[in-house]
Image (tube, rainbow, N blue to C red):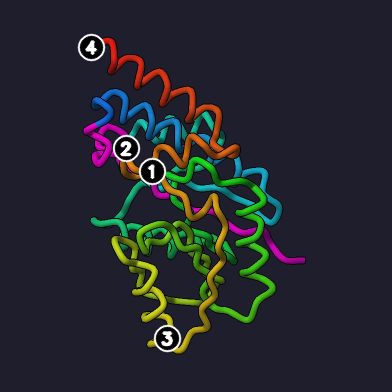
Amino acid sequence: MTAGATVLIPVKNLALAKSRLAEVLPPAGREALARALVRPVVGQARVAAGVEHVVLLSDDEAVGREAAALDVECLAEEARGLNASLEAAIASLVAGGSQEILVLFADLPTVTAAEIEALVASMRTTPADVTLAPSERGGTSALGLPVGISLPLQFGPGSRARFAEAASSAGLRFMEVERPGLYQDLDEPGDIPAVLASPDCAPHVRAVWSRARDATAEE
C-alpha cells in the first residue's frame, strides 16, 4: 500500500508578506490576508485523498501558532533563502520517512482538494520524476518529488522554465499539471478581481479582504 504524500507549505513571515499589495492594503490588512490564505490551503490539503501529512515551513512564530491551531506540524527554516530552506526541509522529511513530497504554496485562494489530489495522482500514475503545477507569470505553485529524486530547487520569478531546464539537464522526466486553482495565485493587485470572481475563492479569504478594504476606506 502506497504511503500518503507529505505536503510542505512554505509560509513567509506574516508581517512581511504580500508586500506587492501595499498600494491597496495597509500593513495590518496584508498580514491578515496572508494569515487568511494559509488556512484554506492547509484545510484543502488535509482533506485531499492521497495526502498523509501537512507541514508548514517558516521562521515566523506566528505561523507556528497557526500550525498548532490547524493541528499540523511546523518546521523551522534551517537555511537562508526559500530554495535552500525548502531543500533542507525536504531532506529532513525524507530522513523521517516521507516517500513523496509535494511543495505547495500558500497564496492559492481558489485551490481545491480535488486539484491537490490531481497532483498527487499524477505523481503516482504518470511516467514522470518531477510533477509541476505552473502558476501565473511563469511561476510554480506546486512541485511534486518522489523519494529518491533530487533536483536543485528553482523557485522564484520564471521558475517554471528553470525547473523544466533543470529536470532536462538531470535526465529527469517532467510533467505539468494545469488546474485553475493552482494557476491563480494572489500576489499583485491585478490578481484580485479574478480571485474574488472565482466560485472556489475561500470564504475566509473573501471575508478578510472585505474587512481590510472597508478599514482602508474609513481611514
Distance, label 3 to label 1, CA atoms, is: 31 Å
Rounded to the nearest angstrom, the CA distance separating label 3 from label 2 is 35 Å
Measuring from the top left, give residue 55's x and y in whole percent: 50, 47
Q: How far is the residue under mark 4 from the one under mark 1?
A: 24 Å
Which of the marked residues, 4 or 1, is nearer the chain's N terminus? Answer: 1
Query: Which structural element holds mark 3?
Result: helix
The image quadrant of residue 11 is top left
- Res. 60 mark: 2
N-terminal-most mark, 3 or 2: 2
Query: Element under label 4?
Result: loop
Q: Is residue 101 among the parts visible in the rendering?
A: yes
Q: Quadrant of the C terminus?
A: top left
In the rendered structure, which amino acid carries the disc numbered 1? Asp
Q: Which residue is mark 3?
A: 168
Tell me whether circle 3 and circle 1 mark residues in contact (CB < 8 Å).
no
Q: Amino acid at mark 4?
A: Glu
Residue 191 - label: 1
Image position of 195 with respect to 96: above or below: above
Number of residues whose C-alpha sits closer than 10 Å to that of mark 3, classed few (under 14), some (14–19) or many (20 or more): few
In the depicted structure, whether residue 173 falls above or below residue 52: below
Q: Hey, what amino acid is under mark 3?
A: Ser
Query: For the magenta stretch, what is the residue range?
Result: 1-23
What residue sits right under mark 4 in the picture? 219
Three-letter code for the amino acid on which mark 2 is drawn = Asp
